[in-house]
Image (cartoon, grey):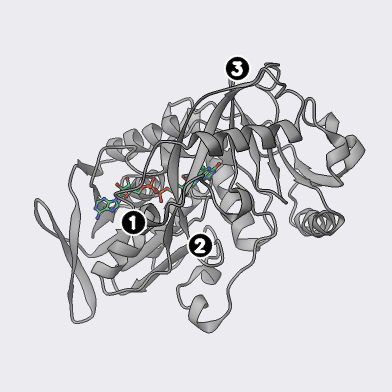
């Protein structure tokens, strides 16, 4: 059996690796180079704190891989299990957080509710007077996205996947309702299965196969901030639920982001969102200044001498319910896209599920029956309470 994987991001490469482990011949087609898409532009958060079973399961199965990544793939991804702290400003948000903590407790995720006054135990300089409470899990954390991408690229190649860079899929070929291959800007390839792992481009690739996917590119930014107190390298990822502000500690700096007031930029980026090839990969200075001032509201480590030292933008692949589509949507066409800001952390399990769908005809690692495309038509969409970064 031969599978063509469209997209050499973390989802496509994890899928290629797992497909090879299932004995499937694999060709990955990537229009750019490794890292052309969103993966290296992500914040790298890895968490099990979600409010739906399928997200918890995808993350949990992925964490099992992230944990052993260095041994398994011989690449150090700087995985720091420093925890993940969600912050609630209002009592209504805090009540919703408490419900999720109870849900997670039933599923064995070590998330706990933290009262406002105690939040400072979990993040240095936290302005406890600003928050009613929060949820903290010590099992969550973050990793280096570029190293992880590199690790999967090497592992997939080592397992025998052919990886073609600079080769764009221009059509998905069908016969009698079944996908039989792809056209590319460098010739045709036959395939028994085509995997759409094209991230923010997934709707375009879906359209080539005659499938309408509700996956929209949305530009999101990160600012690199040098705090005036460099004490946060071992601190948790922190995300504020009411405003969307998040802080991802790193060596000497922090990545700060958020989609404030429903937008993520000082300028309207409608055209960029319409065309994933044309979006601006730079960051907006006014947006970064807002991000820094929001971070200053979260923690005193971002004192008045903190400075913005850089930043970038990438694309979220958004679905209407912030959950991906993982399904063989027509015979021979498997979609693994629409991760809405969670695709880095959930890529290892997604790769396994893709391989199972292709090789076994059904997923066994995670029950992905809630991630079908028809949920949008049938009105049985999912809902995530812990939605921030
Ligand atoms: C600012 C920001 C912060 C984020 N933070 C986090 C986080 O903390 N944790 C987390 O889990 N996720 C985060 N994400 C989301 C994460 O980046 C994505 O969910 C993840 O990278 C998706 O991986 P992917 O492989 O699906 O997509 P990508 O990495 O975008 O790869 C898709 C690839 O498909 C290729 N492609 C597209 N069309 C074609 C074609 N026709 N032919 C050939 N190749 C094609 C593209 O060139 C691209 O390389 C963040 C994203 C952004 C932008």
Q: Which residue is identified by label 3?
A: 252
Mark 1 neighbour density, 10 Å: few (under 14) some (14–19) many (20 or more): many
Tell me whether circle 2 and circle 1 mark residues in contact (CB < 8 Å): no
Q: Which residue is drawn at the image coordinates 55% and 61% (left, top)?
A: 322
Crowd tier of the residue under label 2, counting other residues whose Cα lies within 10 Å: few below 14, some 14–19, many 20 or above = few
Q: Which of the two marks, 2 or 3, is nearer to us in this view? A: 3
Residue at the spot x=64%, y=50% of the render? 388
Q: What residue is pinned by disc 2? A: 364
Q: Position of residue 51 (x, y in %)?
A: 69, 59
| Nearer-the-camera pick, 3 or 168 | 168
One can see residue 216 in this view: yes
Residue 21: x percent and y percent? 36, 47
Query: If you read the primary sequence from the N terminus, does the residue marked by circle 1 or circle 3 appear first?
Result: 1
Residue drawn at point x = 26 percent, y = 38 percent: 33
Query: Does the beta carbon of the residue at mark 1 sit less than 8 Å from ligand 1?
Result: yes
Kindly indicate the quadrant of the structure image that contains residue 97: bottom right
Where residue 270 sits, quadrant-wise, is: bottom left
Instruction: Give the residue at mark 1.
Output: 201
Residue 69 position in % (x across, y down): 50, 33
| Local SS, label 3 | loop
Q: Which residue appears at 34% of the width and 54% of the height?
A: 198
Quarter of the rendering occupied by the N terminus? bottom left
Question: Where residue 226 appears, x then y in whole percent?
Answer: 60, 20
Badge 2 or badge 3: first in the primary sequence: 3
Q: CA distance from mark 2 to mark 1?
A: 27 Å
């Amino acid at each position: 059996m031969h599978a063509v994987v469209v997209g050499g991001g973390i989802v496509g490469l994890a899928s290629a690796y797992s497909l090879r482990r299932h004995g499937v011949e694999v060709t990955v087609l990537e229009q750019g180079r490794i890292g052309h898409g969103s993966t290296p532009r992500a914040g790298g958060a890895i968490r099990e704190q979600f409010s739906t079973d399928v997200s918890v399961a995808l993350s949990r199965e992925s964490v099992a891989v992230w944990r052993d990544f260095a041994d398994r793939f011989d690449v150090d991804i700087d995985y720091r299990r420093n925890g993940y702290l969600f912050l609630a400003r209002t009592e209504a948000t805090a009540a919703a957080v408490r419900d999720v903590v109870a849900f997670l407790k039933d599923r064995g995720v070590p998330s706990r509710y933290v009262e406002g006054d105690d939040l400072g135990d979990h993040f240095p300089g936290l302005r406890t007077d600003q928050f009613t409470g929060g949820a903290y899990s010590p099992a969550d954390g973050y990793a280096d996205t570029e190293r992880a991408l590199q690790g999967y690229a090497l592992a997939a190649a080592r397992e025998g996947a052919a990886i073609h860079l600079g080769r764009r899929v221009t059509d998905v070929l069908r016969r009698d309702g079944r996908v039989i291959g792809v056209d590319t800007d460098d010739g045709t390839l036959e395939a028994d299965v085509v995997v759409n792992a094209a991230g923010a481009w997934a709707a375009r690739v879906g359209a080539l196969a005659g499938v309408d996917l509700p996956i929209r590119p949305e530009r999101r930014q990160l600012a690199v901030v040098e705090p005036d107190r460099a004490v946060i390298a071992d601190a948790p990822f922190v995300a504020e639920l009411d405003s969307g502000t998040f802080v991802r500690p790193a060596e000497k700096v922090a990545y700060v982001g958020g989609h404030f007031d429903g937008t993520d930029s000082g300028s309207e980026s409608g055209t960029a969102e319409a065309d994933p090839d044309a979006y601006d990969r730079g960051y907006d200075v006014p947006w970064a200044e807002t991000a820094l001032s929001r971070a200053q509201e979260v923690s005193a480590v971002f004192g008045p001498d903190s400075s913005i030292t850089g930043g970038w933008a990438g694309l979220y692949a958004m679905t209407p319910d912030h959950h991906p589509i993982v399904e063989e949507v027509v015979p021979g066409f498997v979609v693994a896209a629409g991760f809405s800001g969670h695709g880095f952390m959930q890529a290892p399990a997604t790769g396994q599920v893709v391989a199972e769908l292709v090789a076994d005809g059904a997923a066994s690692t995670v029950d992905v029956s809630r991630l079908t495309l028809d949920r949008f038509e049938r009105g049985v969409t999912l809902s995530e309470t812990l939605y921030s970064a």
